[in-house]
Image (spheres, rainbow, N blue to C red):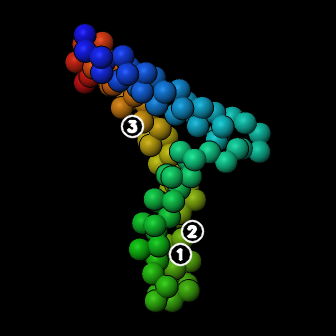
Amino acid sequence: MTPLQPLLALVGAIIVLRTIMSAVRTFVVPRGDNDWLSRISFRVIRRLFDLAAAPSRPFEARDRVMAYYGPVALILLPGWWLILISVGFGAIFWALGLPPL
């Protein structure tokens, strides 16, 4: 066992726990807390939508595109959490000497 393995397992566990707390804070807590993992996801998706709805386009066209921003962001958010949890568990498995995938 290398000294890096326990650190890798700890980092993986922190990623998993932090991601689960993000999901709880976003969907379970009444009035939802401001969570930075969710905020990162929403900001990245917003930048993609801003590219599709450039200010040079007419307002109606931009409005049609931006109407989908909220629903698409909420649908992609669990996928973002799933990726993070997979990375966290992969790090834990790798630290334990198991194949991560």
Q: Is residue 101 left or right of residue 33?
A: left
Q: Which mark is residue 89?
A: none
Could you tell which of marks 2 and 3 lies nearer the N-terminus?
2
Q: Is residue 98 visible?
A: no
- The one nearer the camera, 30 or 97, is 97
Kind of element beneath mark 3: helix
Q: Is residue 33 left or right of residue 94?
A: right
* Residue position for label 2: 67
* Amino acid type at mark 2: Ala
Q: Is residue 83 visible?
A: yes
Q: Residue 13: x, y in percent? A: 46, 23
Q: Quadrant of the N terminus?
A: top left
* Residue position for label 1: 64
Quadrant in the rendering for residue 48: bottom left
| Contact, mark 2 vs mark 1 (Cβ under 8 Å) | yes
* Residue position for label 3: 83
- The one nearer the camera, 83 or 64, is 83
Question: Residue at position x 69%, y 34% from top?
Answer: 28
Q: Between tags 3 and 1, which lies in front?
A: 3
